[in-house]
Image (cartoon, rainbow, N blue to C red):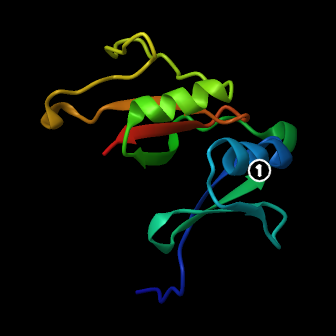
Amino acid sequence: MVTTLRSFSGFSVDDADAALRFYRDTLGLPARENAMGGLEIDLTGDASVFVYPKGEAHAPASYTVLNLVVPDIDEAVTELEAAGVSLIRYPGFDQDERGVARSTDPSQGPTIGWIADPAGNVIALIQD
């Protein structure tokens, strides 16, 4: 077994400055540049994620890189729309006019919506 002191996940972006502004200023997450030349975003529960610049070699992840649990998805969507961020629409999902897939049965999944960061990585907004 490997002894670890700390663990974290990571994903790439094409522009670290744009990512910092998005995660810190638009989403309001504690984000900052770190000593490794990337960004560190503090998450709840003493977790963090490392965001590293990859420049033109970056390709958006083909999966959701971050899940943000919010108390009120409508309020979150309103705040994001005011900041110029629209929800992604996916074929096959029953999404409302704002892009939220609403669940009335928790066994069928959460009430959820998705946005993309400036690098095209997908972030989920999940209503608690």
Q: Which residue occupies 85% across, 47% down?
A: 17
Query: Where's residue 47, x and y in %?
Result: 51, 69
At mark 1, the secondary structure is helix
Where residue 30 sits, quadrant-wise, is bottom right
Q: Which residue occupies 53% across, 39% down?
A: 123
Q: Which residue occupies 48% across, 16% down?
A: 89
Where residue 51 sits, quadrant-wise, is bottom right
Q: Is residue 102 above or below residue 19?
A: above
Q: Is residue 45 above or below residue 55?
A: below
Asked whether 70 or 117 is in front, the reply is 70
Where residue 83 sits, quadrant-wise, is top right
Q: Is residue 72 above or below residue 39?
A: above
Asked whether 115 or 64 is in front, the reply is 115
User: Quarter of the image containing the N terminus?
Assistant: bottom left
State the residue position of label 1.
20
Query: Where's residue 18, x and y in %?
Result: 81, 42
Amino acid at pointer 1: Leu
